[in-house]
Amino acid sequence: MPIDADTYRSTLGLWATGVTIITACAGDEIHGMTASDFAGVSLEPPLVMVCADKKANTLGVIEKGRNMCVNLLASGQDALSNKFASKKEEWTRFDGLECATARTGAPLIPGALASLDCEIVAMHEAGDHVIVIGQVEHVVQGEGDPLLYFAGSYRGLAEGAGS
Ligand SMILES: Cc1cc2nc3c(=O)[nH]c(=O)nc-3n(C[C@H](O)[C@H](O)[C@H](O)COP(=O)(O)O)c2cc1C
């Protein structure tokens, strides 16, 4: 391997991202996890992608149900992000959340900046992850600023930065 794993991880951490919670349903089963490896892929047709660890339990539900809803988190939702990332008592992730149901049946995370409800059209293995491609069937837009993630910490937008 040309670089060591720690250097690789910390370097990827220098790529600032938003934060999403990916939800999915298969029959009565719902599940969801925090993910920042999300991107738009195509405008026509409207395709998005998420990169999920092969060990993520959410991946099994996505595969079974052939759906996912990508919820873009808003500033102030860092505790929710941590909850959906923690393996501790993961069955309590949806406790206390009043989730509406997206058209595919996946839960919509309340307070999200936007939710993109998708049918799965392809899954590609890539190393220890799977690239999940979803066709966006419906979107819901909320309001607010995004929750950002950089170098292992949550961040917010800084007014006037970048100008
Ligand atoms: C800010 C943040 C971003 C994350 N991004 C991803 C990601 O893009 N893909 C992934 O597989 N896991 C990602 N994770 C880790 C998962 O959320 C974590 O492994 C989770 O416990 C998986 O849940 P599950 O096994 O119940 O599906 C991220 C965690 C955090 C805190």
Image (cartoon, rainbow, N blue to C red):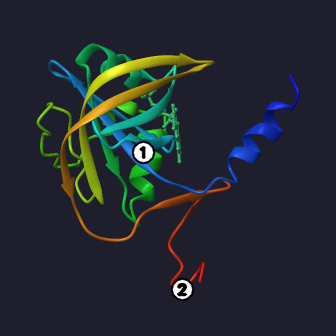
Q: Return the disc, 2 or 1, that comes first in the chain's sequence.
A: 1
Q: Quadrant of the N terminus?
A: top right
Name the residue: 50% across, 73% down. 157
Q: How many marks?
A: 2
Name the residue: 42% across, 35% down. 49
Q: CA distance from mark 2 to mark 1?
A: 31 Å
**Camera-side residue: 108 or 68?**
68
Q: Position of residue 20 (x, y in %)?
A: 40, 47
Q: Secondary structure at mark 2?
A: loop
Mark in the foreground, 2 or 1: 2
Q: Quadrant of residue 5?
A: top right
Q: Which mark is residue 83?
A: 1
Tell whether label 1 touches label 2 (CB within 8 Å): no
Q: Which mark is residue 60?
A: none
Give the residue pinned by disc 2.
160
Name the residue: 22% across, 26% down. 25
Q: Position of residue 111 (x, y in %)?
A: 25, 60
Q: Position of residue 88 (x, y in %)?
A: 47, 34
Label 1: how many Cα within 10 Å (few below 14, some 14–19, many 20+): some
Name the residue: 37% across, 56% down. 73
Label 2: how many Cα within 10 Å (few below 14, some 14–19, many 20+): few
**Camera-side residue: 44 or 108?**
44
Q: Position of residue 118 (x, y in %)?
A: 25, 34
Q: Left or right: 10 with respect to 144?
A: right
Q: Secondary structure at mark 1?
A: helix
Q: Which amino acid does the dot numbered 1 rest on?
A: Lys
Q: Which amino acid does the dot numbered 2 rest on?
A: Gly
Q: Is mark 1 within 8 Å of ligand 1?
A: no
Q: Quadrant of residue 147?
A: bottom left
Q: Is residue 88 above or below residue 63?
A: below
